[in-house]
Amino acid sequence: MKSENLLLYGVCVVMALLFLGLAGLNYFSAGNFISTDSLFFTTVSGMMAFIFLLIPLASMRADKKATKAAEAAGGAAAAAALPGRGGAAALRPGTTIPAGQMMRDAKGRPVPPDVRKMVEQMKETEKP
């Protein structure tokens, strides 16, 4: 998954540089830069570059927040918890689950509470 993210970040940065290059090319090649067409082209190119740069920046910020939350919830309590089992408190709305107890899917993403509840119910019905 890290190689996919690296490829995505690379493509986004290349596209952002391409759009910034187009805006710079327009600035230097336009005879009268303060025209409606030149300003529009520069604004659109700059906005597209900004949008392409938002993807890696937002992902890196989310990763940083996730690591901070995991470090804060880490320790002896997270090590002693059973992975994938939230217990009855996980099924009640408004309760939070420590990061160590959170059920994760195959890609490592947290499982939503309604899916977690269905999995718990299926485990209960399978026991003879």
Image (spheres, rainbow, N blue to C red):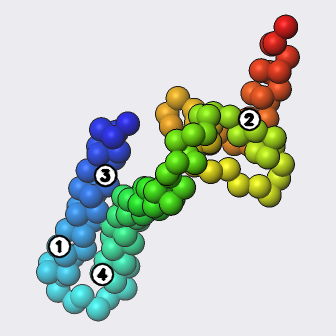
Of the two numbered discs 4 and 3 on the same chain, state the one appearing first in sequence.
3
Closest to the camera, between mark 2 and mark 1, is 2
Whether 58 is drawn above or below 70: the answer is: below
Gap between marks 3 and 2 measured at Cα: 31 Å
Expressed as whole percent of the image width and height from the top left, the position of residue 89 reads 79, 46
- Pointers 4 and 2 in contact (C-beta within 8 Å): no
Residue lying at 76% horizontally and 38% vertically, measured from the top left: 87
Residue at the far top: name it.
128
The residue pinned by badge 4 equals: 38
Q: Quadrant of the N terminus?
A: top left
Disc number placed over residue 9 in the picture, else none: 3
Expressed as whole percent of the image width and height from the top left, the position of residue 67 reads 44, 56
- The amino acid type, in three-letter code, at marker 1 is Leu
The residue pinned by badge 1 equals: 25
Gap between marks 1 and 3 measured at Cα: 24 Å
**Is residue 66 at all visible to an observer of this figure?**
no
Closest to the camera, between mark 4 and mark 1, is 1
The quarter holding residue 17 reads bottom left
Q: Dot 2: what SS?
A: helix
Q: Classify 10 Å Cα crowding around label 1: few (below 14), some (14-19), many (20 and above).
A: few
**Is residue 88 at all visible to an observer of this figure?**
yes
> Is residue 32 found left or right of 123 in the rendered image?
left
> Is residue 21 found left or right of 90 in the rendered image?
left
The residue pinned by badge 2 equals: 115
Closest to the camera, between mark 1 and mark 3, is 3
The quarter holding residue 100 reads top right
Q: Nearer the viewer, residue 51 or 86?
A: 86
Residue lying at 78% horizontally and 29% vertically, measured from the top left: 120
Closest to the camera, between mark 3 and mark 2, is 2
Of the two numbered discs 4 and 1 on the same chain, state the one appearing first in sequence.
1
Q: Dot 4: what SS?
A: helix
